[in-house]
Image (cartoon, rainbow, N blue to C red):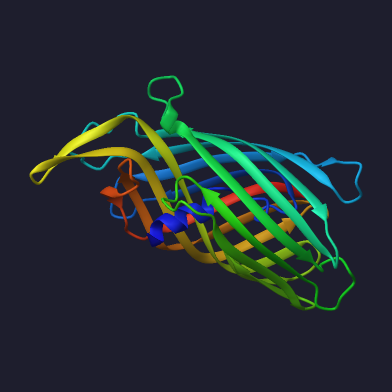
Amino acid sequence: MLKKIIIYFFLPLSLAAQVTDITRVEYTYFPQRDSDNDFRRFRTFVNVPLKLKKKGSYLVPKLEYRNVSFEYNDPTPFDNSRLDDFEHYELGLGYTFKMKKDWRFAVQGGVILASNFQNNKVVGGDFIGTGSVFFIKNKKNDGLKKPWRLILGMRYSNTAGVPLPLPFVNYFKHFDKNWSYTAGVPKTNIKYYLNDRNVFQGLVTLDGFFANIQNNRVFAQGQGNLEADSISMTIVLAGFGYEHFFTKHILLYTYGGFTVVNDIRLRDKNREDVLTINDTNTFYVRAGLKFKI
């Protein structure tokens, strides 16, 4: 159950996690230790804030694309061809408006297609539904000596195996001229601001992916057969990061470190594990360029 909940937290790339991000291009790589497997992902998205007539209100369409290349070379009891390339397409829509006492309300819903698309068409299992509701209190731009931001919300995804929305909390505080921290999901960190252009951080963060497998893989185990319906990866990374601001809104970032949870599994239609592909902790690196407001 805990792993299902972790998947639920990182999969819907929520308005809370990107509350100021307009667009991002990112590349992730990590080899599988003690294995010939490796994982590579290209990801890009764009949020388009559309100002509405009501002051402080915005409609935010979102488009996202991910390509996951998973070199799966370990021996398996089934044909693992066409399990090395997965694609993720997401269409989302968010709405946000100001409330009283510096609070902001935001809601976001979306549909994701995530699959190996082995049959070159879309099937029912490729669809993932997501929905999120947030209350945000942002005191980062009020000229305070110690600015902060609090996000309270609930999030739902039909990949979690939990039929109800689950709550989360995310809190940011600038507790010194050169230091800040964020506590929450999907990332907890502490940052040191060397100057206006260079920022260093220590972090713990979630990452991963989930996708349907077209043409389910069936293999014998014990006295019966198991059937793999989907693939998931859950990563918890501990490490360091660096951000370089070219302008106030455009920055280059990179994270590197070692995984403390590295869980890559095949799952059945009930999201129960049927085969562990790899759970050995390993080196991890991610880098990208983003535009934020």
Name the residue nearer the viewer: 177 or 95.
Answer: 95
Q: How many marks?
A: 0
The picture quadrant where one finds residue 266 is: top left
| Left or right relative to 106: residue 143 | right
Q: Does 210 sit left or right of 167 as displayed?
A: left
* Quadrant occupied by the N terminus: bottom left
Nearest the camera: 240 or 218?
Answer: 218
Tell me the residue at 65%/39% (across/down). Answer: 45
Q: Residue furthest top?
A: 120
Q: Can residue 143 be seen?
A: yes
Residue 170 drawn above or below residue 18: below
Left or right of 228? Residue 84 is right
Which residue is painted at 46% across and 23% down in the image? 122
Q: Residue at 46% x, 61% y: name it.
A: 236
Q: Is residue 115 left or right of residue 222?
A: right
For the residue pair 285 and 16, the one nearer the viewer reads as 16
Vertically, is 147 above or below 231? Answer: below
Q: Position of residue 233 (x, y in %)?
A: 41, 49
Q: Quadrant of residue 187?
A: bottom right
**Residue 293: in sight, yes or no?**
no
In the rendered image, residue 192, in percent from the top left (x then y), is placed at: 70, 72
Residue shown at 46% from the left, 42% from the top: 40
Residue 83 x %, y %: 34, 34
Q: Residue furthest left?
A: 223
- From the top left corner, tell me how far across and down residue 74 is, in percent: 25, 43
